[in-house]
Amino acid sequence: MSFTSLGFIVAVSILCLIYYIIPKKFQWTVLLTGSVLFYMTYGAERILFILLASVTAYCAAVKIDKVYVKQDAYIKEKGLSGKEKQEYILQNKKTTKRILLLAVGFLVFMLAYSKMGNWLQKTVSGLIYGQEKPILPLIVALGISYYTFSLIAYLADVYWRKEKAEKNYLRFLLFVIYFPKILQGPISRHNFLAPQLKQEHCFDYQTFCFGVQLVVWGYFKKLVIADRLSIFVDTVFNDYSACSGAVLAVATIFGAVQLYCDFSGCMDIVRGVSQAFGIELEQNFKQPFFSRSAAEFWRRWHITLGAWFKDYVYMPIVVSPTLVQKLKPIKEKWGMKAVKKIMTAIPLAVVWILTGIWHGTGWPYIVWGIYWGGIIISSMLLESVYKNVLLKLGINEEAFWWRTFQMLRTFMLFCIARLLTMPNSLLATAVICKRIVCDFHVTSVLSNNLFQYGLDKQNFILVIIAVLIVWAVSVLQGKGMVREMVARRNIVLRWSIYFALIFAVIIFGIYGPGYDASSFIYEAF
Amino acid sequence: MKKINVVKTIAFVTLFLVLFAGVSKVMTCPADYRNYQWIAGFYEEPKESLDAVYIGSSNCYSFWNSLTAWQEYGIAVFPYSTNAQPFAAAKYLIKETKKTQPNALFIVNINTLEDNGLRISDFHHLLDYMPLSMNKLALTNHLAKVGGYTLSESMELYIPMIRYHERWDELVPEDFQYEVDGLKGASSYGIYLHGSTDVTEEYITSEKEGQQEPELEALITDLLDFCDEEQVNVLFVTVPRAEKNEETIQKFNLVNRLIEERGYPTLNLNDKVSEMGIHLTEDYYNKQHTNIHGSIKFTRYLSEYLIENYQFEDKRTEDTYTSWNTAWERYRQIIAPYVLDFELESGMQAFDLKAPADFGAIVEDGSLCITWIPVEDADGYVIYRKEGEKDEWQLVGEAYGTAYTDMSVESGHSYFYTIVPFVEEAGNRYYGNYSFDGKMMEI
């Protein structure tokens, strides 16, 4: 059941009604039932993987927690302190670490197998049998990238004693499978989401309205902009060899906007739906195209993924005693400054290669990770040089033109990154880049040539207006919550805005079977 | 929830529904507006005013012309028909039209069985303009079921905006006006008025019956059971389409027999073209549909049958039916460029008299002299003229020979001419066939 289907809207409405009608202590069971049913609409067998993953994480966390409880009781009972205590804790740490690594290893294996199993099996069977045929059943687990990361974060937090293990498996399952975030995130943290799922929620008119408004705004971004732009972008990139450089450049820019509106639109839908149930989900986007650097961009784009990598990959590497040990000779030879730079660069490199792999399989994604990692690491390493140059050139970093330039530069970097993964092969990316540089004729954009790729003139104008609206709203979002700003206006203006948005989605949204005039004109009858 | 919030929510939802209904109506109307006229037009008729309702696919409105029947016999028979209307809908449509016309005769078109393509777009032609009712919902549900559509596929039938919202960039002024034309379902689309094709090769007849098909039998039984239950006055008509396929004709024969066996009247007109005076060479615009000339003849035949068997009365002078008279006056203007006066006069035609094969003309001293090859058995000829293709045909003169000089032409103009042969018997003239398009002459 897609988020953009009518069935989803109807199902969520019914669920919401039941949720607020039944006794509050059962609210979480409504969400659990709804979430399981929603997940099963994509195929009943898929639930097995998520059950397996959640049982693994649940058991491991309970086991780790038990060790800690036992450990605390023992220390208290025996009155251990100092070295004795440290040794005992270290001993237990080994046990908990083993449990953690086993559970995480299993979860990562499932994720890797589901992501790369197909490719791996084809390659292996090709070598053994001389033909590509599946050997083992494939895991086609929905949302596995998101729930695996949530589970790893949960296990790590329990291991680090940042939080207690959940004792009730069904409540834990609800945290894992909670329907708004299961398909596309955000990658929720247990300590953020689980308490809200436990809490009893009274119907709050304002929160509910804000939730619905966010959903409609999400649909606007997804159905009116993203799905409309994808018609053009897909048509161009599916036949890139027949397109001029200028058309490819337009498609690249549109591709970037499409990705943003698609992903952030879906996030708005899921956050809005969740809000209607009185449950907040983490923010995943914060006007990323207003970022002035690549590093800032990634703090504003897919925020929960970046935060996850920071907390569970970057930080563990940075504080790893092994790394500190290995860097000792460098510290003696080059000094602390160099060590600091290396200590930032190495974890960043690991993070970005993993981020690339997380986004997809194949070389384009690895290159994509290296690309972003390279930009962010080099800008970090060259920060002082960069500042010196600006100083010598007398550029005021806070000047409007300079900030605009930085934003455009970041946007262009994003467009280039999109070019790496959009055409599905690096060779195609190279051809497209070459064409954009060597075969760029503005006239082919200005002429009607641009309207041959699935979007006619009216649709082009419409999508540009819609993008401008999103841009204007993004500017306002920088000044506060737009929904609150609208809510403060008088009822006529407020409702006009709501209705305009709702009907914009209904009329201009890309959905349904499509209207084919030829099947309706019966001149021959 | 606070009382004010409840009021606000109800107001918002109500306003949304009103706006949605309005927007949906604007977006829903498909480009050619014909189906809208046949369905929405029906609901404009006063209660218990119609003699009959003609239910079925496009055959109904191409064979039956409600306004020529009115002007000639004063009977009010409205076609509740749409493009490729599924036969499976008949039961529901009788129920629907019976709501306002409980005493009417319900004429069900048998040929509709062959139009049962069950395409979702064909369902739209019918359902989009029916007012919301439990019967409409039941029909929608039934059609989705017989068409094998899933709930998500058929959702567009319940909420047409799902399909039509994409029309936002092709809206035309008519989408906002959305008016019923008041022509009582009489057709006025282009090809019906000026199209003509020879269907001699496709037209076949057969006395045989097709093999029994359980599904077909179940469909007929279901409809007849409904007729029994509702005790409706119903007549099943098979129109003379040029089917080409003998199996289809045999299937119709079988269906007619099945219906008769249940005690319901049928009128199988498949082999009655010559009796009706319909010419296979020019009275059809395609093999399934007659043009206006063919439909005038068919309508006359069926009208006489209805008057004879159902005692329909002439209502032309009744006050309640003024709108029918007005409709006819307007319609006469619409068809004037395509139909000559005598065609609309009952019993005044010599069906076998052929049109002059060809004719030529020469300009002499500002006059046009037309000559033609004589038509066998013709006693004389009348000459009609019009300036533009869409102008009304005007009678300019008559001739007993094979030449006519038109003195009233203007130099530099072009005119269309058509020549109609006639025979005279006992002081009456019987007109024969003529070239519908005429021939253009430049002066």
Image: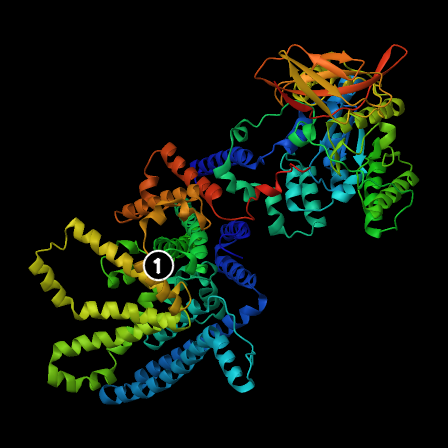
In which quadrant will I find the C terminus of chain B? top right
Q: Is residue A12 above or below residue B262?
A: below
- Front-lying residue, B275 or B397: B397
**Residue kind at label 1, given as amino acid type:** Asn
**Is A109 displayed left or right of B177 in the figure?**
left
Q: Which chain is indicated by disc 1?
A: A
Q: Is residue A117 above or below residue B156?
A: below
**Is A325 displayed left or right of A29 in the figure?**
left
Q: How many other residues sit within 10 Å of disc 1, few (<14), some (14-19) or many (≥20)?
A: many
Number of numbered callouts drawn:
1
- Front-lying residue, B16 or B60: B60
| Mark 1, residue position | A284
**Residue in the picture at 78% in, 43% down:** B113
Q: Is residue B286 above or below residue A192?
A: above
- Residue A509 screen position, x and y as percent: 47, 46
**Is B324 displayed left or right of A481 in the figure?**
right
**Residue in the picture at 43% in, 68% down:** A147
